[in-house]
Amino acid sequence: MKAILSLALSLAFSLPILAAAETKRPNLVIILADDMGYADIGAHGCQDIPTPNIDSLAKDGVRFTDAYANGSFCTPTRAALMSGRYQHRSGMEDLSNVSGPLPKAVTTLPDRLRAAGYTTGMAGKWHLGDQAGFTPVDRGFDEFFGFTGGGHIYVPKANSKGEYAAPILRNREPVKESRYLTDAFGEEAAAFVGRQRGATKPFFLYLAFNAVHTPLEATEKYLQRFPNITEPKRRTYAAMLSAMDDAVGLVLAKLDAIGQRDNTLVFFTSDNGGPTTRNAVNGSRNTPLRGSKCETFEGGIRVPLLARWPGVLAAGAVYRQPVISFDLAATTLALAGADAKGVEGVDLIPFLTAKKSGAPHDVLFWRNRTRSNNYGARQGDWKFVHSTEGDAEPGPKQTPARDMLFNLASDIGEQRDLAAQHPDKLAALKQLYETWSDEVDADCRKLGIEPMMPKTAPGAKAAPKRKKTKQ
């Protein structure tokens, strides 16, 4: 009898404790910039464009020096972030209107988080499918405000046509939007956070700006902040970035207002390096990195990454091991206690809190066969690169790709090709890359999707069609 009573008392006291623990799972916020230069935040030394709100995440949290995007342009990185896997495994090696939407066979990050009891919201650019069944509210988001394509005008214009003038959607319904688009995304994201005041469920917010992607458009309010920048493109870029920083500030302030600052992990990053020489050149800077968006030099793939979680992550910390976009998916899933089956990313929190040592990854890979066939791999400080520079299309304004080897510890700008001095290291990295490439292609075929092949390969198809029945 005493044993039964003891068990009953134990259950009576443990259930409220478990319920309380449930509410302590952190809220999760991922903020993604579009086409932002590596050098264009104060935390990375930018002098001409103040970014106080973005910089506050580094001041109050962790700045990653060696953070990478999974892809060197839009859709591939977003596919990796939303799937937690190399995008090549699901055929997402080009833009969504070329590759097709993220296959239905892929369980998305918001799918997993919602199944774990999170309220999920998104504001901004999707770029992973615009057909019925493939939009954000079809792929795990409870709420969506934004657009599904690859870009959008920022200032509404009468009679505008084309993809960049497509209606802004609230969930599935078009809305008439008159605000400067970056302002709108910040306000809508902050409103989503505000609606979580007093909620019993934790929340996940994905704020995916189209800023600072072209078209270069800013309102006078933001342009007036930069009278000393005389180069027109850089001045408009600065104004657009300043608007984005304000929008980030709105979200951070709303977290404070609802009392959730300390119970929220916030990530800020970008989908690729700045387009300094090709594909939507916008006035960004990647200093001191070599290369641009659409290339696998550091300038195309190394991106800002900041993380804030007060009381858990040390303020002002710097983390120097290589990490990559899909680690954000793995980290959020681990904190949520969500299903992470098949996820390739690594939970970063144990590394950031010194519970684990060493590097999260042995080797990282990049590949895009449709943008001049650029690819590469990094292991430790060594990086193998096969990449073009210049125009996106082969021709006199593009430098042909070749196999190169760099040691990033002593040459972050990738100026000294060491391939001739270290042929064995180059060969080893190439072999790792080729094994990985074959593996992800095999996984892609398991979904009934033929992997994209280089445009330059004899008889290759640049953009094979998906088998729709397999999506």
Image: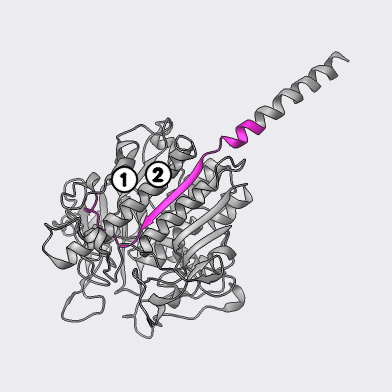
Quickly name the residue at label 2. Answer: 252
Instruction: Return the x and y of residue 160 as percentages of the image width and height.
Output: 37, 81
| Name of the residue lying farthest toward the top | 2
Mark 2, secondary structure of its residue: helix
Quickly name the residue at label 1. Answer: 53
Q: In the rendered view, how is the structure colored?
A: one colour
| Name of the residue lying farthest toward the right | 1
The tag earlier along the polypeptide, 1 or 2, is 1
Residue stretch in magenta: 19-41
Amino acid under label 2?
Leu
Work out which quarter of the rendered image holds the N terminus and state it.
top right
Instruction: Return the x and y of residue 221 as percentages of the image width and height.
Output: 26, 59
For residue 249, above or below residue 449: above
Crowd rating for badge 1 (residues with CA inside 10 Å; few <14, some 14–19, many 20+): many
Instruction: Return the x and y of residue 120 as percentages of the image width and height.
Output: 55, 53
Could you tell me if residue 34 is visible in this image?
Answer: yes
Q: Was residue 295 drawn as part of the magenta stretch in this picture?
A: no
Work out which quarter of the rendered image holds the C terminus and state it.
bottom right
For residue 383, above or below residue 355: below
Horizontal side of residue 357 vs 17, given as left or right:
left
Q: CA distance from mark 1 to mark 2?
A: 8 Å
Instruction: Return the x and y of residue 328 as percentages of the image width and height.
Output: 44, 49
- The quadrant holding residue 55 is top left
Residue at image position (27%, 45%) is 52
For residue 166, above or below residue 243: below
Q: Was residue 27 drawn as part of the magenta stretch in this picture?
A: yes
Which residue is more in the foreground, 228 or 405? 228
Numbered label tally: 2
Amino acid under label 1?
Asn
Residue at image position (34%, 84%) is 458
Circles 1 and 2, Cβ within 8 Å, touching? The answer is yes
- The quadrant holding residue 62 is top left
